[in-house]
């Protein structure tokens, strides 16, 4: 029983042979969305109560327009009753593809939405720092008060006003007079 990361690596290698990495990324994202929106389909595809050939036939019919490698993966997962792994495989493939393409996805949490100029400046600065193509997702959280909190590749940088105020409060509390 392989894990989602192994399936993601194998699919990226197969897609790389034909240069279809981006096409597979898009199709796998669509399949993930469909599976998440229709959880009963996963139950059906993974149930031992329906013969394997019938389940695979349903998968072929439902996903007949997708890339051959993606369809073969779906049929194999259905046969093994591991269809439930599709969202995790799609996430793994996306991360591996980003690494392969030199992309870095960054979440920027701000009190108000970033302007286009702010997002462009932040993107430029991060691209210089990391040497990768940066894709910024801006999430708004009024609790940060001001500034920006960045999350990427297991790193979290907190330059928010809230974090600075909390640090200042701690220093004042530790101060001995």
Image: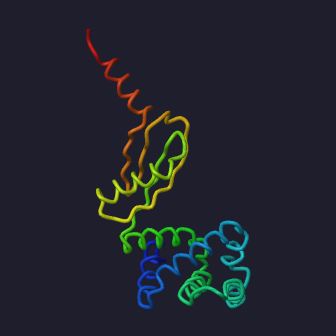
**Whole-percent x and y of residue 27?**
58, 78
Query: Relative to 134, does residue 166 appear above or below in the rendering?
Result: above
Q: Depth check: 162 or 173 in front?
A: 162
In the displayed image of the protein, which residue is found farthest to the top? 177
Could you tell me which residue is drawn at 40 percent across and 56 percent down?
A: 123
How far across and down, in percent of the image, does residue 72 sit?
Answer: 56, 88
Q: Position of residue 96 (x, y in %)?
A: 41, 72
Along the line of sight, the residue nearer the viewer: 110 or 74: 110
Residue at image x 49%, y 79%?
Answer: 22
Q: Is residue 164 left or right of residue 109?
A: left
Q: Position of residue 77 (x, y in %)?
A: 58, 81
Direction from residue 54 to residue 10 in the image, left or right: left
Quick one: 43 or 144, which is closer to the camera? 144
Q: Quadrant of the C terminus?
A: top left
Q: How is the image coloured?
A: rainbow
Q: Eyeballing the image, is 116 above or below 73?
A: above
Front one among 135 and 37? 135
| Name of the residue lying farthest toward the front | 117
Locate residue 165: give its quadrant. Answer: top left
As drawn, is 61 to the left or to the right of 120? right
Q: How many marks?
A: 0
Quadrant housing residue 51: bottom right
- In this view, 13 is above or below 143: below
Q: Which residue is depicted at the point 51% across and 51% down?
A: 138
């Amino acid at each position: 029983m392989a894990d989602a990361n192994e399936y993601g690596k194998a699919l990226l290698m197969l897609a790389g042979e034909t240069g279809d990495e981006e096409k597979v990324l898009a199709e796998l994202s669509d399949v993930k969305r469909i599976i998440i929106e229709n959880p009963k389909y996963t139950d059906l595809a993974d149930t031992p109560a329906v013969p394997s050939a019938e389940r695979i036939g349903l998968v072929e019919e439902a996903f007949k327009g997708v890339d051959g490698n993606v369809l073969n993966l779906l049929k194999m997962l259905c046969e093994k009753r591991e269809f439930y792994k599709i969202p995790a495989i799609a996430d793994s493939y996306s991360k591996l593809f980003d690494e392969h393409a030199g992309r870095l996805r960054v979440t920027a949490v701000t009190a108000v939405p970033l302007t286009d100029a702010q997002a462009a400046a932040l993107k430029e600065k991060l691209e210089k720092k990391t040497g990768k193509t940066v894709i910024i997702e801006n999430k708004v959280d009024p609790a940060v008060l001001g500034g920006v909190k960045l999350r990427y590749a297991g790193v979290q940088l907190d330059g928010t006003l809230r974090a600075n105020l909390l640090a200042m409060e701690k220093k004042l509390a530790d101060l001995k007079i």
